[in-house]
Amino acid sequence: MKTNHTAETASGRNSDRPRKILLTGATGFVGRHLMESWKQRNDKIFAIATNTAPVKSVAPAYITLLDMDIVDEMSVAILFEKIQPDIVVHTAAMTKPNDCEQDKESAFETNTLATKNIAECCKKFNSQLVFLSTDMIFDHPFASSESDDKKPVNYYGETKALAEEEIARSGCRAAILRIILVYGKLLKASRGTFLHWVKDSLEQDKEIFVYTDQHRNTLYVNDLCAMINHILDHGNTGFYHLAGEEIFTPYEIAVKVAEHLHLDTRLIHPVTSGQRPEIARRAAYSVLNTHKAKKELGFVTTPFDVALRESFD
Ligand SMILES: NC(=O)C1=CN([C@@H]2O[C@H](COP(=O)(O)OP(=O)(O)OC[C@H]3O[C@@H](n4cnc5c(N)ncnc54)[C@H](OP(=O)(O)O)[C@@H]3O)[C@@H](O)[C@H]2O)C=CC1
Ligand SMILES: Cc1cn([C@H]2C[C@H](O)[C@@H](COP(=O)(O)OP(=O)(O)O[C@H]3O[C@@H](C)C(=O)[C@@H](O)[C@H]3O)O2)c(=O)[nH]c1=O
């Protein structure tokens, strides 16, 4: 992976020609928000998922939706040959850590091998790659910086750490964005976030058990999309950590959601991870240091209370 901090020529912004953007993960939470944020772009956009049917009626008409399994190397190679994308925003992944722990083969194929193949195609067609990685490649009791040693907290984290290495090995131009517990508005035909799980549960009078011993600087999806769009326009490469300013436990977030929506906080039960362990281990303290992104990309974050309001507008 080239790590130069480049600009106009690499991004293609020195010409007015519309660029070709390939998005993987069209039906995902981040993918749906990205497509919405691209309504004003003068680019040709292709967006893939294994099944794009759920977003057919809601995706902007100028986006070409394609059904494709990214694990299928040959189909991906043919797609690159056909489109020759200028930019690839690769968000598709097996994103549930518990599922990854239980089906390691699929997790490795989807998160590591498919990313390796995509990165090699990017190298071949000189496409810039924007890849979404995770805080779960770290298991540190301090805020992790881009240059810190990796220590995956679970198998999902391991597949993403290996994917990062494959991208580096491919030699393609890449921006690797490590992000953490993303939240934001629930768009039509999209899966919800932790915040929506809290809302739906409390609205149905369901009790929920929420951790008091996990700390996260959770990231607002609009702030993430703004950074991805900055990178599309400026061609930045290298590693960047993107996260919120404030650090909360899931319990604190759940209470904030309930209070904001005037729901019954008595349904939210504080628990520790030890009392209700998950299949995949989670870190007690997972916080990303965003100093580099602020300095080099002009990363700004929306205060949590503002983003919370916007998430339920
Ligand atoms: N959301 C978060 O809190 C965080 C996310 N990330 C990373 O950000 C990225 C985006 O996450 P998010 O949008 O929340 O993820 P989602 O789980 O919401 O979406 C995943 C997307 O990947 C697609 N996908 C999965 N497997 C395949 C496959 N084999 N072939 C083609 N498409 C596939 C899914 O499509 P379909 O359902 O049709 O298969 C879906 O569109 C991921 O890489 C994730 O690891 C990192 C840290 C935090
Ligand atoms: C389901 C559940 C979650 N939680 C907590 C755990 C966690 O900190 C938070 C969100 O839970 P989730 O299972 O949605 O998230 P989880 O899979 O832990 O988190 C992530 O998603 C993947 C894709 C990532 O890469 C990570 O950055 C991360 O943010 O809520 C509870 O406290 N109680 C519960 O019953």
Image (cartoon, grey):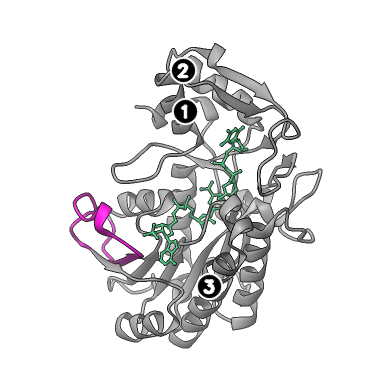
* Three-letter amino acid code at the position of disc 2: His
User: Would you say the residues marked 2 and 1 are in contact, meaning their CB atoms lie under 8 Å apart?
Assistant: yes
Q: Dot 2 lies on which element?
A: helix
- Residue 40 lies, in percent from the top left, at 26, 53
Identify the residue at horizontal 44%, vertical 37% (top origin).
184
Identify the residue at horizontal 49%, vertical 18% (top origin).
258
Residue 260 got which mark? 2
As drawn, 48 above or below 169: above
- Distance, label 3 to label 2, CA atoms, is 39 Å
Give the mark nearer the N terminus: 3 vs 2: 3
Q: Residues within 10 Å of mark 3 (few under 14, many from 20)?
A: many
Which callout, 1 or 3, points to the residue nearer the camera? Answer: 3
User: Would you say the residues marked 1 and 3 are in contact, meaning their CB atoms lie under 8 Å apart?
Assistant: no
Mark 2 beta carbon near ligand 2 (under 8 Å): no
Q: Is residue 189 left or right of residue 2?
A: left
Q: Residues within 10 Å of mark 2 (few under 14, many from 20)?
A: few
Residue 54 got which mark? none
- Residue 21 lies, in percent from the top left, at 35, 69
Q: Dot 3 lies on which element?
A: helix
Q: The C terminus appears in which quarter of the rendering? A: top left
Which stretch did the figure color magenta?
41-63
* Magenta highlight on residue 61: yes
Which residue extends farthest front?
102
Which residue is disc 1 drawn over? 308
- Distance, label 1 to label 3, CA atoms, is 32 Å
Which residue is disc 3 drawn over? 115
Give the mark nearer the N terminus: 1 vs 3: 3
As drawn, 58 above or below 204: below
Q: Is residue 133 left or right of residue 149?
A: left
